[in-house]
Every structure is written in structure tokens, then in C-alpha cells.
């Protein structure tokens, strides 16, 4: 929930709060969330904002989205992203930019068969970064 308030010099600022709804009861989540729940809530909020305000914007960028998530939430995030990608495939300008060290998460996304390849960055023998294209089906 966002509540506008007047800021200095005629600007507006918004105070946000995150609540969890159980039936008809709202529970304030401040101070109740684990680190993983905070990460997941942040991703959900970003996805909702992108869906609301970025209808014609085809880029979704996530940097280390599985940090602090447990296995169940990682699988849920992979499934949700899979559904989002499936629904956006008809749009020729949609791109997902995902930065992660979590190879299991990449495998989970690969099960959705929504892309053929991904870019992997590795260090070579001299310590230089090399970008290589990898086939997600053989990952």
C-alpha cells in the first residue's frame, strides 16, 4: 500500500508498506520477514511495477534473484518467471536479463524450454573473463 505525503519544495514522496493477507486479515510484514522473504517480496513488487507501468517495455532485469531464498521459493520463482516469459513470448521485444551464480536456478528455468541458449562468463587460465554461449538443453 502506498500513501502519498507532501515532501519539501512541492515534491511528493510515498511511504510503502508490505502486508500479507490471510483471508480478510492484513498482517504488517515489517520486522516479520526473513531475508529470503524480503528478497522474494522485492522481486514480486518489481515484477508488479513492471507489469503495471512497463506494458510496452520489454526488458526485465534480475540480479541474483535467488539470494537468501529457500529451495521452495527458488522453484516458485523459476515457475513464475517461466509463466511470465511464456505470456510475453508473443511480444517480439521482450528480454529477460538474469545475472546469477545459481546454476540450479538456470537448470530450473531451462526445464520450461523457453530459450535455447544463455551466456556464461568464465575466467580463463590467465584470469581474464570470457563470454561463451551455452546450450541450455545440455546444461
Image (tube, rainbow, N blue to C red):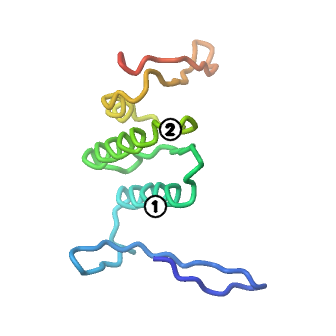
Instruction: Kindly state the secondary structure of the residue where label 1 is placed.
Output: helix
Task: Work out which quarter of the rendered image holds the N terminus and state it.
Answer: bottom left
Work out whether mark 2 precedes mark 1 in sequence or the reverse, and give the earlier one: 1
Residue at image point 47% right, 43% down: 64
Q: Which residue is mark 2?
A: 98
Q: Foreground residue, 85 or 120?
A: 85
Q: Is residue 60 left or right of residue 83?
A: right
Query: Residue pushed farthest front?
Result: 90
As measured in the structure, the alpha-carbon distance from the residue carrying label 2 to the one carrying label 1 is 17 Å
Query: Compared to 78, does 27 lie above or below?
Result: below
Q: Which residue is mark 1?
A: 45
Query: Compared to 56, does 137 lie above or below?
Result: above
Q: Is label 2 in contact with label 1 (beta carbons under 8 Å)?
A: no
Q: Quadrant of residue 81?
A: top left
Query: Compared to 73, does 5 lie above or below?
Result: below
Figure label count: 2
Query: Residue 68: x percent and y percent?
Result: 37, 50
Q: Foreground residue, 14 or 59?
A: 59
Instruction: Kindly state the secondary structure of the residue where label 2 is placed.
Output: strand
Task: Work out which quarter of the rendered image holds the C terminus and state it.
Answer: top left
Residue at image point 35% right, 16% down: 138
Query: Compared to 103, does 85 lie above or below?
Result: below
Q: Foreground residue, 69 or 40?
A: 40
| Res 107 label | none
Pointer 1 local density, CA inside 10 Å: few below 14, some 14–19, many at least 20: few
Query: Residue 124: x percent and y percent?
Result: 58, 15
Residue at image point 53% right, 24% down: 119
Query: Residue 106: x percent and y percent?
Result: 39, 31
Query: Residue 122: x percent and y percent?
Result: 54, 21
Amino acid at each position: 500500500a502506498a500513501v502519498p505525503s507532501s515532501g519539501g519544495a512541492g515534491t511528493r514522496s510515498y511511504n510503502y508498506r508490505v502486508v500479507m493477507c490471510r483471508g480478510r486479515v492484513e498482517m504488517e510484514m515489517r520486522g516479520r520477514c526473513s531475508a529470503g522473504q524480503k528478497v522474494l517480496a522485492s522481486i514480486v513488487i518489481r515484477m508488479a511495477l513492471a507489469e503495471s507501468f512497463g506494458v510496452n517495455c520489454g526488458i526485465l532485469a534480475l540480479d541474483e534473484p535467488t539470494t537468501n531464498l529457500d529451495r521452495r521459493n527458488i522453484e516458485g520463482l523459476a515457475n513464475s518467471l517461466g509463466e511470465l516469459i511464456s505470456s510475453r513470448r508473443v511480444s517480439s521485444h521482450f528480454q529477460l536479463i538474469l545475472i546469477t551464480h545459481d546454476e540450479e536456478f538456470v537448470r530450473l528455468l531451462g526445464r520450461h524450454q523457453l530459450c535455447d541458449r544463455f551466456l556464461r562468463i568464465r575466467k580463463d587460465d590467465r584470469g581474464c573473463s570470457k563470454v561463451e554461449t551455452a546450450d541450455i538443453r545440455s546444461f
